[in-house]
Every structure is written in structure tokens, then in C-alpha cells.
Image (cartoon, rainbow, N blue to C red):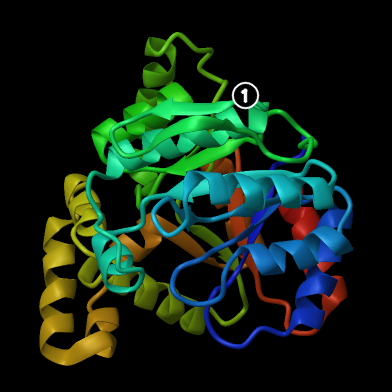
């Protein structure tokens, strides 16, 4: 059976939109499950997704992630419903809370209470998609005029994937979401974490397979392993040292407390390069894979054995579009 792989679009740096379209078309033809576009404090996610909706036919299109603070739940429903119409019903709403640094110091919105904000956002989003009059009495949102979207959405429900890592938010994901995007789980703990999550889904009265699990980490096929490792180590160091406490606490829970402390100390004294250099090889290898195609396939098999359903991959092929296509096809299997 074909493996469900996903590819992403970087939210940083210069984007060659022509090349992005070419690769999206190849991914579409190769049978890639979905293309995910991130949003942080750079480009928005919805504009490039509009472009990809126009130039693809089958591949699903997703956000990874948009936060639930900087737009109202109704605005999110407008965005996703419109894109679902443009794409012929191919959207996935990948949502998360982000963290207080981004929410409070980029968007200028108070961060807490995060779980309440997520819960109410998802409930309102689903009401609007279903066409129900918007009458909602929550702790944050109090909506009493019965608004509905002024067009008929392509689907009455757009799949909602939630990025969550603390216990209460993971429990909410198990109760309410269509997909779980776990964060920073080492490969050695992935099976037990997914098994635990499936148990939460069952406890919520749902079939344990009702929620799709997207593998955390990365599978990066590249001939320039040193450069790939440096790039991913930089990202890992940034999240551990600079993106609030959530990611550092997550890695610490999985037994990498000493490694996280070393990264933080190095970053504090020497900046980004020192923090990146402090990332231990064991931590980097547990969180993701960087190397050749054969090793990537083995890593994907390990993630499948652990229970993951979707598998993010990154392929370095330069301008060789044929190689890009062949690599995707090999990873799909």
C-alpha cells in the first residue's frame, strides 16, 4: 500500500514561486498526500495555498500551522471555506496556539487561556462550516446574531488537525480533531506516545483510527548531509532556546533535559551559532533523519511501525525535477 507522505513549504527566505508551482505539480502527479504551508511571522499561509490550489488537482492542501489568536474563528472559517471552494474540497485546517512570544509580541494579543481559545475556535469553525446559525456562548466568544456564511461551502466539514503537546491539549485533540500533529517526540518514544493517544481517542468514545496522526520531526533526503544537519540543528536549537518553554519542556519530558540545558546555555552565552553547535547528535537523530534515500525509507518504515499515518519529507534535488519526482515516488513506495 502506498505510503502517505507530505511535503512542506518554508515560510522564511526568498521563494521562487515558479519552482514552487513546478514542484507542487510533480507532487500532485506523484501521489503525495498533502502540501503543508507554515505561517509564523513571515508570509501568510493562505496566499500561497491559493496559488497551489490553482495549479494542482488532487493533492490535499494544508496549513502547518495557523494560530488561533491572530484571526477570529469566523475569519478562519472564511479563509478555509473559500480555499476549499477554489481547490475543489482539498483543504486541511492545521491549527495551533503558537506561543506567547509570537502571539503577544508579534500579534499583540494576550496568550492565555490557550486551550479555551483553541476549543472555542474549533467549535465555532465547525458550526460555520456546517451552515448552522452562529449562536455561541463561550468564555471568550459570545455570538448571538445567528450569522451564517453567505455562500454554500463545498463541504460541511473541513478536517481540523491540531498541533498539541501538553496533556490537556492532547486530550482535547483526541476528542475533537480529525488529525493530531505531535511535536518534538523522539523516535524511541513515538510508538508509546501514539498508542497513548489512540487510547485517549477511544476514551472519548471514538474509533481509535478516527484521528489521523502526522509524524513529528522530519525525513530529509539529501546528498549534503552536513548542511542538512546544520539547518535542522539550527531549527531545533531555536525552538529549544527561544520559542518559550513548551518545546524545551517537551524534550525534557522525553529524557533530553541535559541536552536542552546545554543548548540554552550555549545560546545565552554565544548566540544562535553556539546554540546550534550545542545540539547533540543523539537528539538530532531522534527527532529526525537526514541522509540518503535508503535510510529515509527505513526511517519512514520505523514511523509507520510506531503508528504514524502521515509522514513529512523534504527532498533536495536542486533543479533536477526528474530526480525530485523519482525520489517522491520511491518514498511513497
> Can you see residue 306?
no
Q: In this rendering, would 30 be left or right of 170?
A: right
Q: Quadrant of residue 175?
A: top left
Residue at image point 21% right, 71% down: 241
Camera-side residue of 301 and 56? 56
Camera-side residue of 56 and 88? 88
Rendered-image quadrant of the N terminus? top right
Count every numbered label the image shows and give the total. Answer: 1
Q: Is residue 3 positioned above or below 283 on the image?
A: above
> What kind of element bears circle 1?
loop
Q: In this rendering, would 178 be left or right of 174?
A: right
Q: Quadrant of residue 279?
A: bottom left
> Can you see residue 165?
yes
Q: Is residue 196 positioned above or below 231 on the image?
A: above
Q: In this rendering, would 242 be left or right of 76?
A: left
**Residue 25 point in image, percent of width and height:** 86, 64
**Residue 302 point in image, percent of width and height:** 52, 42
Name, please, the residue furthest toward the top.
205
Residue at image point 70% right, 44% down: 81
Neighbour tally class for label 1: few under 14, some 14-19, many 20 plus, Cα within 10 Å = some
Q: Quadrant of residue 293?
A: bottom right
**Residue 70 point in image, percent of width and height:** 42, 60
**Residue 163 point in image, percent of width and height:** 43, 46
Residue at image point 21% right, 64% down: 244
Residue at image point 72% right, 85% down: 16
Which residue is label 1 attached to? 132
Camera-side residue of 220 and 102? 102
Amino acid at each position: 500500500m502506498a505510503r502517505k507522505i507530505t511535503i512542506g513549504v518554508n515560510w522564511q527566505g526568498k521563494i521562487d514561486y515558479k519552482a514552487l508551482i513546478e514542484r507542487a505539480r510533480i507532487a500532485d502527479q506523484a501521489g503525495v498526500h498533502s502540501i503543508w504551508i507554515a505561517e509564523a511571522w513571515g508570509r501568510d499561509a493562505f496566499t500561497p495555498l491559493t496559488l497551489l490550489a490553482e495549479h494542482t488537482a488532487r493533492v490535499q492542501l494544508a496549513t502547518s500551522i495557523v494560530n488561533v489568536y491572530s484571526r477570529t474563528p469566523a475569519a478562519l472559517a472564511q479563509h478555509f471555506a473559500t480555499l476549499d471552494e477554489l481547490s475543489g474540497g482539498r483543504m486541511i485546517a492545521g491549527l495551533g496556539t503558537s506561543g506567547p512570544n509570537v502571539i503577544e509580541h508579534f500579534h499583540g494579543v494576550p496568550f492565555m487561556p490557550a486551550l479555551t481559545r483553541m476549543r472555542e475556535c474549533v467549535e465555532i469553525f465547525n458550526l460555520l462550516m456546517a451552515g448552522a446559525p452562529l449562536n455561541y456562548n463561550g468564555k471568550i466568544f459570545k455570538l448571538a446574531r445567528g450569522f451564517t456564511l453567505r455562500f454554500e461551502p463545498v463541504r460541511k466539514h473541513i478536517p481540523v488537525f491540531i498541533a498539541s503537546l501538553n496533556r490537556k491539549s492532547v486530550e482535547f485533540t483526541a476528542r475533537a480533531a480529525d488529525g493530531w500533529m505531535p511535536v518534538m517526540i523522539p523516535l524511541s518514544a513515538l510508538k508509546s506516545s501514539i498508542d497513548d493517544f489512540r487510547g485517549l481517542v477511544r476514551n472519548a468514545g471514538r474509533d481509535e483510527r478516527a484521528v489521523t496522526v502526522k509524524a513529528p520531526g522530519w525525513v530529509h533526503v539529501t546528498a549534503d548531509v552536513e548542511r542538512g544537519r546544520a539547518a535542522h540543528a539550527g531549527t531545533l536549537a531555536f525552538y529549544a532556546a527561544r520559542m518559550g518553554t513548551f518545546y524545551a519542556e517537551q524534550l525534557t519530558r522525553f529524557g533530553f533535559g541535559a541536552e536542552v540545558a546545554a543548548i540554552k546555555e550555549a545560546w545565552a552565552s554565544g548566540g544562535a551559532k553556539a546554540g546550534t553547535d550545542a545540539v547533540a547528535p543523539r537528539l538530532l537523530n531522534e527527532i529526525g533523519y537526514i541522509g540518503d534515500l535508503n535510510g529515509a525509507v527505513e526511517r519512514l518504515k520505523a514511523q509507520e511501525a510506531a503508528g504514524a499515518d502521515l509522514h513529512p519529507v523534504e527532498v533536495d534535488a536542486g533543479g533536477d525535477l526528474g530526480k525530485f519526482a523519482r525520489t517522491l515516488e520511491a518514498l511513497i513506495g
